[in-house]
Image: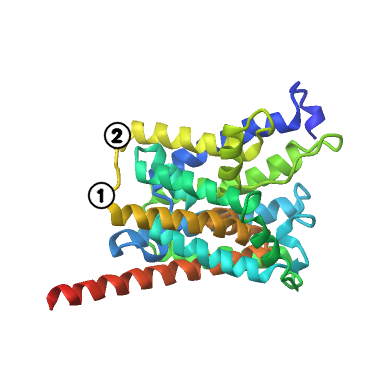
């Protein structure tokens, strides 16, 4: 379809601008709604209900929209890595657990930290840079042999049985139950729905609107591990690499979140409170950078955007991330309890 648009630029260049627009919308909405899977799963009791409602609403809309696009023939995931018949189970499970655990240590996944960094949180900004460095190290750096070794452990797995629309209805129905039981306001749920709508929009944009058989670009959706690694590499080596959808997405999220933070008077400079917090944050960032690459996605890439593809790899990765979040929260809670007992003694 791209050749009919007459934009006068290449699909790759157009994907940067498209990613920027998607990122702007995500940044604004995520800042205003506090969109965060960690908060939805293990946040404080006061914030957990509303956060779950927003996340579930986003997922429900993303699933229906994505599978609707598949049914209309606007996008196909047959050649996407999420639909691969040979699943690198060791890499996905280990990576997902690492990412989830790191999310708890850093107090936010990569998408949340990106939004927070734009609102003045220097802790989040430092963590994002460290995570991007770790992701590059295991993608193309000294740790790449580890990734290749783990990726070699594959298991042949077929996709989900039955029709895609049926699974979409089931997932959306479960999400709706969570929404109904949540304490999220109508405005927050609307924001979650709009975030969810960005998922099929990104898939359709890169897989259909910008598709050119003579100059094809990769089918890409909302994600943050790969895009941050790409943005870092492009930022320091723009002469030897080309920006794409991911770089535009990251830039857009930063700009959108900054605008929303300033407009809502939520912009505030924050730094590390001490060495302990810094150590946990940076350790979590390393785990997320490495784990996001090994798992093939983050809470957004494998979760919000991956689950709607109904790919076994995405489902497995998201499950491992969730398990890692709960495990990380349990470990930190136990350490806190032990310290309290020692202090009482």
Residue 40 position within the rendered picture, expressed as x and y whole percent measured from the top left: 41, 61
* Above or below 33: residue 239: above
Residue 314 position within the rendered picture, expressed as x and y whole percent measured from the top left: 64, 62
Say which label, 2 or 1, has the lower sequence index: 2
* Above or below 318: residue 155: below
Quadrant holding the C terminus: bottom left
Is residue 304 rendered to the left or right of residue 77?
left
Single out the mark in the foreground, 2 or 1.
Answer: 1
Q: Is residue 188 visible?
A: yes
Residue 53 position within the rendered picture, expressed as x and y whole percent measured from the top left: 43, 59
The answer to which of 318 and 122 lies nearer the viewer is 122
Q: Residue at the spot x=40%, y=55% of the render?
A: 106
Residue 306 position within the rendered picture, expressed as x and y whole percent measured from the top left: 62, 57
Query: Total marks drawn?
Result: 2
Name the element at disc 2. Answer: loop
Pointer 2 residue? 265
Pointer 1 residue? 273
Q: Residue at the spot x=68%, y=56% of the render?
A: 67
Q: Is residue 60 visible?
A: no
Q: Please rate how many residues cluster around mark 1, counting C-alpha atoms within 10 Å: few if below 14, some from 14 to 19, many from 20.
A: few
């Amino acid at each position: 379809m791209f050749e009919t648009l007459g934009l006068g630029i290449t699909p790759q260049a157009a994907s940067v601008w498209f990613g920027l627009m998607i990122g702007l919308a995500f940044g604004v909405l995520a800042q205003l709604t506090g969109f965060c899977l960690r908060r939805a799963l293990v946040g404080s009791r006061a914030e957990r209900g509303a956060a779950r409602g927003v996340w579930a609403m986003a997922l429900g809309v993303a699933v229906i929209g994505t599978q609707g696009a598949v049914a209309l023939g606007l996008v196909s995931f047959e050649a996407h890595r999420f639909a691969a018949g040979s699943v690198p189970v060791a890499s996905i499970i280990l990576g997902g657990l690492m990412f989830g655990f790191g999310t708890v240590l850093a107090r936010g996944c990569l998408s949340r930290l990106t939004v927070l960094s734009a609102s003045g949180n220097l802790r989040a900004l430092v963590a994002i840079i460290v995570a991007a460095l770790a992701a590059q190290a295991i993608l193309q750096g000294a740790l790449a042999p580890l990734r290749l070794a783990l990726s070699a452990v594959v298991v042949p797995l077929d996709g989900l049985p039955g029709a895609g629309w049926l699974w979409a209805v089931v997932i959306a129905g479960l999400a709706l139950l969570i929404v109904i039981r949540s304490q999220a306001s109508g405005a927050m749920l609307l924001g979650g729905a709009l975030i969810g709508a960005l998922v099929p929009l990104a898939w359709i944009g890169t897989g259909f609107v910008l598709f050119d058989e003579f100059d094809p670009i990769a089918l890409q959706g909302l994600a943050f591990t790969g895009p941050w690694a790409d943005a870092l590499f492009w930022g320091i080596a723009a002469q030897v690499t080309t920006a794409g959808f991911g770089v535009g997405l990251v830039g857009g999220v930063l700009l959108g979140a900054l605008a929303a933070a300033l407009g809502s008077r939520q912009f505030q400079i924050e730094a590390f409170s001490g060495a302990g917090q810094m150590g946990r944050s940076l350790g979590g960032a390393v785990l997320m950078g490495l784990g996001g690459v090994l798992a093939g996605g983050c809470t957004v890439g494998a979760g919000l955007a991956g689950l709607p593809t109904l790919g076994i790899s995405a489902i497995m990765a998201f499950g491992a991330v969730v398990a890692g979040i709960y495990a990380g929260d349990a470990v930190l809670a136990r350490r806190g309890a032990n310290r309290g007992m020692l202090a009482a003694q």
